Amino acid sequence: MLKTLIAPLALLITGIAMFYLFPYNLAFATRMVVMVVLVLSIDLILGYAGIATLGQAAMYGAGAYAAGLFAIHVWADPLAGLAAGAVAGAVLAFVSGLVLMRTSGLTLIMLTIAVASICHEIANQARWLTGGADGLRGIRMDPLFGAFEFDFIGITGYWYALGVAAAVFAFLWLLTRSAFGLSLRGIHESPARMAAIGAPVYWRRVCAYTIGGAIAGIAGAVAAQATQLVSLESFAFSLSAEALIMLILGGTGRLYGAVIGTLIFMMVHHTAAANDPFNWLFVIGGMVLAVVFFLPRGLLTLPTALLRLAPKPQSKGTRDAARS
Amino acid sequence: MPQGLEVRGLSKQFGGLTVSENIDFDLRPGDRKALIGPNGAGKSTFANLVTGILSPSGGTIRFDGRDIARMNEAARVKLGIAKTFQITTLFRHMTVRENLRLPILEREGRGFAMLRRADRSARIEAEIDALIDQFELGALADRPVEGLAYGQQRLVEMALTLALKPRVLILDEPAAGVPSSETHLITDAIAALPGDLAVLIIEHDMDLVFRVARSIVVLVQGRILTEGTPEQIARDAKVRELYLGGAHA
């Protein structure tokens, strides 16, 4: 019992510690937490269900614009806006998923990119609604729970983002251990066998993609509410691609992999870009190459790999306990 | 109403190629039938037509009097028609236990249950334990399937299919690729199947067929050549010619 609590507690402490580590850069800390949520959504659909995607930004952007527009035109309550973002992401994922989930492999990847590009272009053209390339401005949030104002330093924004991320993580923790989660892993490993045991593989995939879309929409909504701005970049291909790299870095098919990959990628990105604004991409590239070559299952397996390198024999079987 | 499977006039063409032609076939509860025939006779195609992986070009497939020829694979599994794969198709990175949990969850229609842990139902875990005991997989229960010997994987394949509680079980070459030292595992498992289950075995290994089948159907070039008890088939001149001389060139 205690053992199962250590990892989530460590995660929570990391989240709280980040507040004190970046006192003058809470915007960056908030962006990290938002990215964790987006990468978790990709982990669900790619890492667990095996749905290859390079277009998760479509649902992220839909959630961001939905939350922003909802706050401007309907109601500025943060939680209502969060729900609007989740619904927007889920609806877009469901509708596009009805077509996308009939395909797989390279076709699927290309189609996910296409969906995100179409969203990007729609947001660009519909200037009257979205502000086009200038971005969506004028978002004013009501206080959270009617009590906590969104201050310009970003204190409320950070705690809000962290709370949402913790809730999403807990939900996915349950989901991935449920019968539904097990069936997604089954579909990932063998769609033919899943059909042969009577599972509706197509609808299972559509369902997973929709849930992933809702979570990406939540990530976008939090970003819009915390920064009070939505830019066209929310739909950008580079966002989908970077999020995917973060997941691969940490380790796919594990929730902790998504979290650790995102935090490490963004911290390295942050420090490398600050030290050398021109060549920081080399650092990221080198890191990704090293992980893919030496730790193909992600940074999460680093402790196990190091222990295996150690000359002394160690007790067997206890080292791969962090499987989630 | 007649129980079990009733196939009438079943045919399948791939373009101009006829792989199944006018097949009549019955499989009743308690039957132990074997389907034999040379390579390319259309045995696997027949199995795929019955389970719904392929749809027929003509003819009817009835199950308990109900026409199922247009149903998809998953719907037929729900009715109780299950098949093992010729090439082992398991969830390779999952443990034996997880491999058996999945079909039970699907059978019970829990595949969309999201907020309850999948491994916390005492009843389902007991059912998994029973299957593990039945196939003597106890020592391997918590090992990933990819690490098991091939014969053991074939047993998991059978256990997984039985976990669906089928009423018609189609075993597509259950002993294919299994070293002869381990085939007894397969024959024992087949002998221990529930008595009222309708079983169809598609197999190359004649020893195994003659040990477990009570009736044999011989398929040649998509058509039924003959059908009979193992003794009749063993004495049949056409069958002997087929297996010894390789006629029908």
Image (cartoon, rainbow, N blue to C red):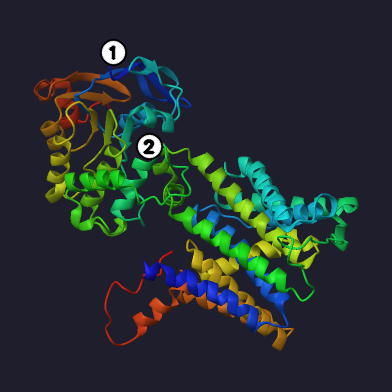
Query: Which quarter of the rendered picture does the C terminus of chain B lie within?
Result: top left
Left or right placement of residue A122 versus residue B198 in this view:
right
- Look at the picture and state if A18 lies above or below A43: below
From this viewpoint, is residue B229 visible? yes
Q: Residues within 10 Å of mark 1 (few under 14, many from 20)?
A: few
| Image coords of residue B247 (percent x, y) | 23, 27
Left or right placement of residue A129 versus residue B103 in this view:
right
**Disc sitting over residue B195 in the figure:** none
Q: Nearer the viewer, residue B115 or B201?
A: B115
Q: What residue do we see at 65% from left, 52% from top? A: A112
Quarter of the rendering containing residue A117: bottom right
Circle 2: residue type: Glu
Circle 1: residue type: Pro
| Image coords of residue B91 (percent x, y) | 36, 51
Whole-angstrom CA distance, mark 1 to mark 2, is 26 Å
Q: Nearer the viewer, residue A241 or A257?
A: A257
Q: Secondary structure at mark 1?
A: loop
- Look at the picture and state if A16 lies above or below B241: below
From this viewpoint, is residue A296 visible? no
Q: Chain of mark 2?
A: B
**Disc sitting over residue B108 in the figure:** 2
Left or right placement of residue A310 versus residue A267 in this view:
left
Q: Which residue is mark 1?
A: B2
Q: What residue do we see at 85% from left, 50% from top? A: A73
Q: What residue do we see at 48% from left, 27% from top? A: B15
Query: Which quarter of the rendered picture does the N terminus of chain B lie within?
Result: top left
Q: Nearer the viewer, residue A271 or A85?
A: A85
Residue farthest to the right? A128
| Image coords of residue B152 (percent x, y) | 22, 51
Quarter of the rendering containing residue A288: bottom right
